[in-house]
Structure formats: C-alpha cells, structure tokens
Amino acid sequence: MKFIFTGGGTGGHIYPAIALIKAIRKSDPDSEILYIGKINSQEEKIAASEKIAFKGIKINYFHRKFTLKNLKTLYLFLKAYCKARKLIKQFKPDIIIGTGGYVCAPVVYAGARQKIKTIIHEQNSVPGITNKFLARFCDKVAISMPTSKAYFPQEKVVLTGNPRAQEVMETKKVTKADLGLSKDKKLLLIFMGSLGAKYVNEAICKILPELAKRADLETIFVTGKIHFDNIIKEANIYNNQQNIIIKAYVDNMPEYYQHTDLIICRAGATTLAEISAIGIPAVLVPSPYVTNNHQEKNAQALVNQGGAIMIRELELDEKLLVKQIFSLIADPYNLRLMKNKLKKSGIPNSCDLFIELIKSL
C-alpha cells in the first residue's frame, strides 16, 4: 500500500505518526510512505532522521481572533492545498493519515476532495480546530481518549489509542544497572517535555534539598535544554549525588519509564498515552499555555480514572509538591492501585488497532 502521512507543529502530533509508520513498515515492508509537512519544520528533521520521504509545504495557522493576518493565512492555505493536490496526484496514495496540526488541513482536505481514503487522529481529550474542520470530510476519526468522541460524527469515530504507546511498550527491556540507577531505591522521574518549564523547574529546585535527604528515593530531574545551564548553576551541589541526577534531556525516556515508580510531568496527550500504557502513577502539572487549555482536560481524564493527581501551575508551590510526592511514595498500596487503574485505561496495542482500521477501509 501507499500512504501519505501529514502532521506537525509539536512532537505530540509528529511522534504518533512516526510510531505508526514504523509499525506499518514492520507489518508491510513493501509499503511506500510519503510525509507531507511544513517546510523547515520539526517534522522535516524527524522524517529525515527516520529515513522517511518528505515533501514540504508553506502554511500558517489561523488566529482565533479577527486579524488581517488571517488573509495571508488563507492565501497560504489555498497555495498549500494546490500543492498538496499535485503531490497526491503524483504519489497516488491508497490512504492519507493526518495526525494533527494546521499542516494537516490542506493535505487531508485535498485527499478527501480527490476521493482518497482519509483518517485523522486526535490525541487530546478536546480536539483542536484543524481536526474539527477535517472531521466533516475524512472517512474515519481515530481517537486516543474516549472523552473526545463527543466532538466528532459518531459514525466515523474509532477508539485506537495513541500509536506512541505501543512503541513505548515494545521498547527493549533494560536493567536499572544499564541506566546507572540504584536497584534498591524507588525512582522519581521529573520532566516537563523537551523544552522544560521555567516556573515548574524553579519549584523543583526548591525541593531538591528535601529529595536529597531521602535515602530510599532516587530522583531524575530533566530540566529541558534551554533551562539546563541556569538550573545546574543553582542546583549543582545536588547534581550526581547519591540520589539526585539532573539532566538537560533524555533521548531514551521509554527505558527510564520501565523503572519509574512516580512521575511528575506535563499533561501532553502523547506523554499521558505512554504512562497510561505502562502504568506510571503521576503528579500532573498541565501547561496553561496551550490552546483551549487542553492539557488540563487531558489531565482530568487521568485523575477521573484514579491514576493521577493534578496540580495546576497557579496552585503549585514547593510545600504542596513535597507533600504529594512523599505521601505517594510512602503508600505502595495506593501506588499499585493507581498503576493498575492506569493500565486498565491505557491502550498498549494502539498500532495494531490503527492498522486494523486502515485495513477496514
């Protein structure tokens, strides 16, 4: 089969596509795949690193409030639509899959107008403007969270989960020793995504002295690349002590997931899909700086399932954070209960379900 994938803007839209592409290549080595994304974008770099054929289009996002800038956005959309039509005619795909972000709009829409089978994938509990628009034209809507079903035409919706979850589940098992971790301590993993979060990082710095006192607890604090230098100056006294490890970035996060007892993180859809599939109890600090406040809604879904605690950024302070960490770590029964509830709600075979959906078309 021949596939066109499109999606971009953030890793949350790109990595599910990459995970699914890997699964398709594994199940059908003769498949042909073309990725259409924004020129000079994160998706272009990632596609190159994964040896996926890539074509770029020029596109911009629509501003939600009225502004003359949207006239330029509309012009770029029409140009991108025309280029997408041309690329689709040249490549002749059997199916087009959009995983979110405004770059999807001209590609999936052009495919639907040419009677190509189309699927969009929604990672969040509340969909963005692009997927709401495309849902009217696509053949199927694959969702990651049951709560997003209400926003789409019911006859089109299929619950597949997030393909990234299965990729993480199938990561080769490693030992704590392989990662340089202590086998006798619980592991607390703290990270706020690849860029980090300044306000949350500052709160974490304030609790490092308390965490350092815990002989039964090992903490990995992933600051994000842009914050690392400042954090390491402030907290260097604790770095690489017996039980505090500070890193700028971790590129093999799924290996650390295997041994994590408690995680403190944002509530991006892909991260939540990963930790749900594995079953990692979480303290979630959703980003308030995202469209539609969707991270808080994502987080609330896990809280409702009993697998996570949420602290809104405005309510975050070091005393509350320490209290939540230590009360959870001190209660292995509750941690196990949270783990089981998360695993029950997680979808660890998402790629398989997605491939079944593709075959059904």
Image (cartoon, rainbow, N blue to C red):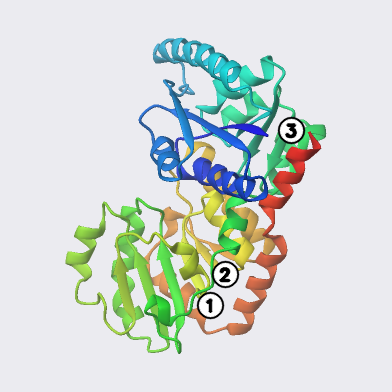
- Separation of disc 1 and disc 2 at Cα? 9 Å
Mark yes or no: residue 273 visible.
Answer: no
- For residue 108, side relative to residue 36 (left or right): right
* Disc 3 residue type (three-letter): Lys
Residue 140: which disc?
A: 3
Tell me where residue 240 appears, x and y as whole percent. 26, 77
Q: Nearer the viewer, residue 180 or 330?
A: 180
- For residue 277, side relative to residue 176 (left or right): right
| Sooner in the amino-acid sequence: mark 3 or mark 2 | 3
Residue farthest along the left direction in this orientation: 233
| Sooner in the amino-acid sequence: mark 3 or mark 1 | 3
Q: Nearer the viewer, residue 159 or 88?
A: 88
Question: Do the residues under discs 1 and 2 have CB atoms within 8 angstroms?
Answer: yes
Residue 328: which disc?
A: 1
Residue at (63% x, 58% y) in the render: 302
Question: Do the residues under discs 3 and 2 have CB atoms within 8 angstroms?
Answer: no
Compared with residue 313, is residue 11 higher up or lower down, i.e. above or below?
above
Tell me where residue 165 appears, x and y as whole percent. 60, 56
- Separation of disc 3 and disc 2 at Cα? 32 Å
* Disc 1 residue type (three-letter): Leu
Please tell me how crowded label 3 is: few (under 14), some (14-19), or many (20+) other residues with Cα within 10 Å: many
- The secondary element bearing badge 2 is classed as loop
Tell me where residue 112 appears, x and y as whole percent. 68, 20
Q: Which residue has dot 2 on it?
A: 281
* Disc 2 residue type (three-letter): Pro
Compared with residue 59, is residue 221 higher up or lower down, i.e. above or below?
below
- For residue 136, side relative to residue 68 (left or right): right
Quadrant of the snapshot with the C terminus: top right
Tell me which corner region of the image, top left, top right, bottom left or bottom right, holds residue 177: bottom left
- Separation of disc 3 and disc 1 at Cα? 40 Å
